[in-house]
Amino acid sequence: MASSRKSVLFVCLGNICRSPIAEAVFKKMATDASVVDKWRIDSAATSTYEIGNPPDHRGQACLKKHGVPMMHVASDLKKKANSVKNSKAKIELLGSYDPEKQLIIKDPYYGHEEDFENVYQQCVRCCKVFLERNS
Ligand code: 6LJ
């Protein structure tokens, strides 16, 4: 059963802003749709800047406001990739699922609260479509 689970790994630069939000949003949607057990859901960083750190406090505040639980510690994509043997993974932009066609989910690190809200809304729109297409 564990091996027949679908997997999704959300990735961004530091794994403290965008990808933990996407992970938390997707996990909540899958939980609410009672399909969370069918999935492995995680996130990781392309850089080592923030490995071991919790999500950015602005993202934490945003998800708290929307009632989406987020529990994550930044982890390293390269390290994860080395632990996978016969990967059939596809690499895609999460934004390519956006019905509003905002392809790029921009790095909000040097931004403000509203940039995190925009990241959140993009993740909600995209994760919804991604889950529908993979159910
Ligand atoms: C090597 C030089 C860079 C960022 C971020 C930016 C910068 C981040 C960050 C996203 C998540 C030693 C580490 C860049 C976590 C940290 C500050 C610089 C880190 C960059 C460029 C444009 C917009 C945002 N770099 N940390 N140091 N995003």
Image (cartoon, rainbow, N blue to C red):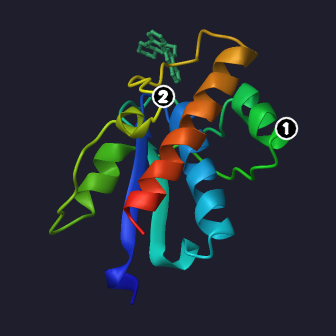
Q: Can you give x and y, in whole percent of width and height, for residue 74 in the image?
A: 53, 43
Closer-to-camera residue (134/74): 134
Q: SS at mark 1? A: helix
For disc 2, the marked residue is: 100
Mark 2 lies within 8 Å of ligand 1 (Cβ measured): no
Mark 1 lies within 8 Å of ligand 1 (Cβ measured): no
Q: SS at mark 2? A: loop
Name, please, the residue furthest toward the front: 99
Amino acid type, residue under disc 2 in the picture: Glu
Q: Can you give x and y, in whole percent of width and height, for residue 80 in the image?
A: 33, 55
Quadrant for the C terminus in the image: bottom left
Q: Which mark is residue 65?
A: 1
Closer-to-camera residue (97/23): 97
- Is 3 above or below relative to 92? below
- The residue at the point 59 percent across, 9 percent down is 110
- Is 17 above or below relative to 108? below
Q: Can you give x and y, in whole percent of width and height, for residue 11 in the image?
A: 41, 40
Q: Is residue 72 left or right of residue 58?
A: left
Name, please, the residue furthest toward the bottom: 1
CA neighbours of label 1 inside 10 A, class few (<14), some (14 to 19), many (20+):
few
Q: Can you give x and y, in whole percent of width and height, for residue 37 in the image?
A: 54, 78
- Is 119 above or below relative to 131? above
The answer to whether residue 52 is seen in the rendering is no
